[in-house]
Structure formats: structure tokens, C-alpha cells
Amino acid sequence: MLEVKKSAKTPAERRKGASRVTGNAISRALGVKIISVGRKQLRAEMRVTPLHLNNAARVNGGVLMAYGDVVGAAATVANLNPGERTSTLESKTNFFAAGIGPVMKATVDLLHSGRTTMVWQTTIRNSGDGSRVAIVTQTQIRLPAAKPAAAAGK
């Protein structure tokens, strides 16, 4: 059983947790930058580059889905209890408008934080006109710390 505690993490500890996710290869390739992170919300930006674009010169839907996944995971990791791990159980993306940039802004809001799961909703907007491009809703499982290999066989 995982114990659910009200997070006593400092802003610096949350940012460090989020950076563990945004420091990985896909996050760096996408160009994800964390702007702020708290217990119930994370804000991020992704500058649109030619690599993000489809043949219609709009941000590719897969790029938007990956961006949503990265920032949702970052919000989760930033708010896990010490020793916990996470994995995405479910992710759903609704598209509303073309991604045109020049920066895609993401706001990740906590919808639920329970004993075994967290649910986050990410709203992605164009920076130019503020139009809503997509909403990504994802469920993250909270997993206890991995047991050392020697103890796992016991």
C-alpha cells in the first residue's frame, strides 16, 4: 500500500522532479521548457521548429501528443512521494485547432490525486492568438520504489 501524503516538497524539489522528465531525450528533442511547477499545476513551453511541422506547415498531431505526455509526466514526477515511480496508464488527446506557434504553451492541471493514481489535464495553446489547440487527459499510476535485485527474489 502506498501512503498518500500531502506533499511537503519545496518549489525547488518540484522543479528538480519535473527536470528529471524534461531532461530525457524526447523532451530535449521536442524542446520542452518548464516555466513553473506547483502541487496542482505545471506550465511549460515548446518553441515550434521545422521538425515539429507536418506538410501543411502546422504542428504535427503526434508532436502535440508527445508534448502533452511529457508535461503530464513531469507534473506527476514533480509531485510523487519520496521513492515512488510512475507510468502512464491512459492518455487521450482531443484536437481543436491547428498548432501554429511560434510557441506552444501548455498548462497542466491536477484533476485527481489518489492513493494509486493521478489524473492530469493538459491544455495546449498557440502563443500568438491564445487559441486552444488540444487537450490531453492522462492517468498516471503511482508505483512504490523498485526493490533491489537481491531482495526481489526473496
Image (tube, rainbow, N blue to C red):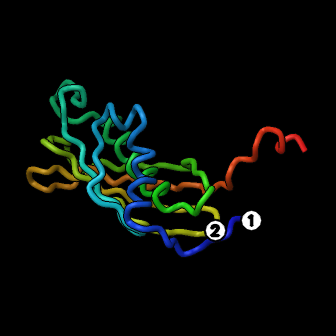
Give the residue displayed 78% in from the left and 38% down from the top. Answer: 149
Residue 88 or 135: which is nearer the viewer? 88
- What residue does disc 1 label? 1
Q: Residues within 10 Å of mark 2 (few under 14, many from 20)?
A: few
Give the residue displayed 63% in from the left and 68% down from the top. Answer: 115
Task: Identify the element where label 1 is drawn.
Answer: loop
Residue 41 or 68: which is nearer the viewer? 41
Q: In the image, is 102 to the left or to the right of 74?
A: left
Label pair 2/1, CB-CB below 8 angstroms: yes
Type of the residue with mark 1: Met
Q: Quadrant of the N terminus?
A: bottom right
Q: Position of residue 39 (x, y in %)?
A: 42, 69
- What residue does disc 2 label? 115
Which comes sooner in the sequence, label 2 or label 1?
Answer: 1
Figure disc tally: 2
Vertical position of residue 150 compared to residue 105: above or below = above
Q: Quadrant of the C terminus?
A: top right
Task: Identify the element where label 2 is drawn.
Answer: loop
Residue with the most extreme left position: 128
Q: Which quadrant holds residue 37?
A: bottom left
Type of the residue with mark 2: Arg
Q: CA distance from mark 2 to mark 1?
A: 8 Å
Residue 103 or 21: which is nearer the viewer? 21
Q: Residues within 10 Å of mark 1 (few under 14, many from 20)?
A: few
Q: Residue 93, can we see it?
A: yes
